[in-house]
Image (tube, rainbow, N blue to C red):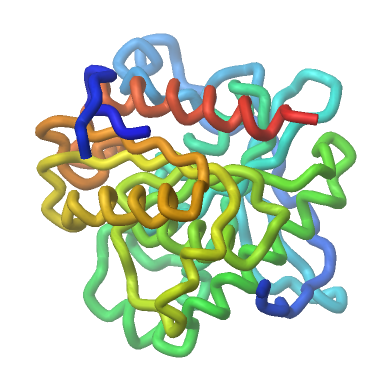
């Protein structure tokens, strides 16, 4: 399926993972506590202060030692909920990543964002890209996939998460690596990828192994990722009869869902999110 931002047709062997131990929750609770005046001015897609959500930083542990961090959000309501991993294209300290986890909690999921860029110093500025490569040069795609598997394993330990696989929401590189994860793990039940592009992988046939339904969101004016790559991805999945949806957003640039960026488009951000949560609910709530 492929539609534009108005809903019209646009014509367009699993790898073994290293396993890590359980994680510990640190500082888990509602963040923000902004005043009403501040709330009135906040972007329409910001939900971090919603009292129906509990959220905060977690630390994953292996052999009793802290390894790397993540961000977790869950509904305050009792019950069990599907788990969704949020895979960023930037540091998880960029606020829209914790906000995405909180928005998932509001929609009835448990959202967990593993810090896949954890080799960077903890005080590394979100907007500083110069010099990053020196810290992450030895942390390749396979290392990141192992980090994601650690987060997936942790979801299984939570008593309020249903143990029937998980969904993924990825942004930019995070969208691309989410598709790689779906190619390797049948535990992935649905993938939502925002402007993921097509990266370089050792196995050119890797995406042929994806079986989970995929939903793609792509701005037509993306200055960072060629919009045509989303169409190529759609065609790859259609050829293998994978359920796929592609939504193109006219005039939208890269990062249109991030309210801290100049490219933020609140109209498209809200529309894309409503489509994403409907899609995740459809496939993650199936028996």
For this view, does 145 lie left or right of residue 275?
right
State the residue at coordinates (83%, 51%).
Answer: 156
Count of numbered badges drawn on the protein:
0
Residue 45 locus on image (x, y percent): 38, 23
Which corner quadrant holds the C terminus? top right
In the rendered image, which quarter is residue 56 located in?
top right
Residue 125 x, y percent position in the rendering: 33, 62
Q: Residue at x 73, y 29 (%)?
A: 286
The answer to whether any part of residue 56 appears in the image is no
Q: What's the residue at 23%, 18% (across, down)?
A: 6
Say whether residue 260 is visible.
Answer: yes
**Relative to 256, residue 66 above or below:** below
Q: Residue at x 34, y 77 (%)?
A: 200
85 left or right, relative to 245: right
Q: Is the residue 277 above or below the residue 242 in the image?
A: above
Between 167 and 43, the residue placed more toward the observer is 167
Q: Nearer the viewer, residue 104 or 55?
A: 104
Identify which residue, 26 or 229, lies in the foreground: 229
How far from the left and from the top, in percent, is residue 261? 22, 41
82 on left or right of 177 = right
Q: Nearer the viewer, residue 1 or 264?
A: 1
> On the image, which quarter does residue 29 sit in?
top right
* Residue 254 position in % (x across, y down): 21, 47
Quadrant containing the N terminus is top left
């Amino acid at each position: 399926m492929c539609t534009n931002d108005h809903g019209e047709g646009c014509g367009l062997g699993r790898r073994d993972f290293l396993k890590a131990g359980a994680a510990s929750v640190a500082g888990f609770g509602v963040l923000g506590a902004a005043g009403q005046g501040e709330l009135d001015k906040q972007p329409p897609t910001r939900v971090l202060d919603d009292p129906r959500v509990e959220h905060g930083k977690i630390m994953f542990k292996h052999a009793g030692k802290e390894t790397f961090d993540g961000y977790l959000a869950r509904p305050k309501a009792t019950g069990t909920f599907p788990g969704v991993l949020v895979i960023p294209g930037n540091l998880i300290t960029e606020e829209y990543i914790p906000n995405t986890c909180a928005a998932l909690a509001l929609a009835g999921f448990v959202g967990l964002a593993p810090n896949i860029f954890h080799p960077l110093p903890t005080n590394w500025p979100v907007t500083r890209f110069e010099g990053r490569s020196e810290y992450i040069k030895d942390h390749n795609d396979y290392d990141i996939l192992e980090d994601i598997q650690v987060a997936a394993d942790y979801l299984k330990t939570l008593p309020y998460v249903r143990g029937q696989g998980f969904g993924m929401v990825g942004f930019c590189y995070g969208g691309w690596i989410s598709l790689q994860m779906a190619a390797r793990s049948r535990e992935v039940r649905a993938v939502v990828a925002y402007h993921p592009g097509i990266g370089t992988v050792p196995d050119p046939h890797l995406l042929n192994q994806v079986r989970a339904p995929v939903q793609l969101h792509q701005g037509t004016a993306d200055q960072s990722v060629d919009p045509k790559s989303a169409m190529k991805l759609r065609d790859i999945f259609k050829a293998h009869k994978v359920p796929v949806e592609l939504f193109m957003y006219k005039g939208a640039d890269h990062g249109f869902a991030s309210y801290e960026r100049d490219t933020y488009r609140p109209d498209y951000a809200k529309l894309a999110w409503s489509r994403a949560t409907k899609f995740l609910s459809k496939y993650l709530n199936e028996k």
